[in-house]
Image (tube, rainbow, N blue to C red):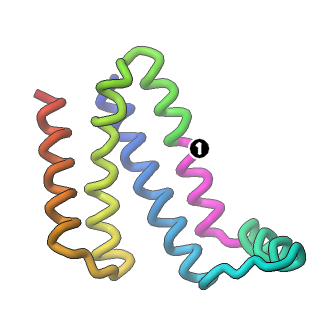
Amino acid sequence: MRWLLVAVIVLATTGGQVLQAAGMRRHGEVHVTRPGALRKMLAWIVRNEFIIASVACMAVSFFAFMSLLSFAELSFAVPATAASLVLQTVLAKYALKERVSWKRWTGALLVACGVVMLAL
């Protein structure tokens, strides 16, 4: 059951982060210098389907993490769910067309090795 929850957390967190990045790219750079600009940006955010889906994914991730913590130790839960960093790096490269340096790939590989070590 705990690995199922880890999978839900990893997929939901990854989906939420990628959707959030895509939504904010659609908006462009944020310049909030006065209250009217903040209201305008918030109005745009609540109508952006990527941001709404991102919030839903992050809510699923949050509640799955709370459920995982109800019976698994924190020292297991946090490192195991770090696998989302690996998926986020892959999706950043291929879905969002970001340039990912060899240092980031190495970091993602090290995180993956840590998650594998937890599984053993």
Q: Residue drawn at (36%, 18%), measured in percent from left and top?
A: 72
Residue 79, x across and y down, in percent = 29, 36
In the image, the segment drawn in magenta is 48-60
Q: Using the image as rendered, state which of residue 7 and residue 104 is in the foreground.
A: 104
Q: Quadrant of residue 15?
A: bottom left
Quarter of the picture containing the N terminus is top left
In the image as oriented, which residue stretches furthest toward the top?
71
**Residue 101 in the figure: left or right of residue 67:** left
Q: Give the residue displayed 51% in from the left and 74% down from the top.
A: 22
Task: Specify whether 38 is left or right of 90.
Answer: right
SS type, badge 1: helix
Closest to the observer, 86 or 53: 86
> What is the x, y in percent for residue 120?
10, 27
Magenta stretch: includes residue 55: yes
State the residue in front, 62 or 5: 62
Amino acid type at circle 1 is Ala
- Left or right, 118 with respect to 11, comes to left
In-front residue for pair 8/98:
98
Please determine whether, in this image, residue 88 is positioned above or below residue 120: below
Give the main secondary structure, helix, strand or loop, of the magenta stretch: helix
Query: Looking at the picture, how far across and down is residue 64, in whole percent?
Result: 48, 33
Q: Is residue 103 above or below residue 115?
A: below
Residue at 34 percent across and 61 percent down: it is 88
**What's the residue at 33%, 80% (across, down)?**
98
Snapshot quadrant of residue 42: bottom right
- Callout 1 crowding tier (Cα within 10 Å): few <14, some 14–19, many ≥20: some
Percent position (x, y) of residue 73? 35, 19
Q: Is residue 25 above or below residue 21?
A: below
Residue under pointer 1:
59
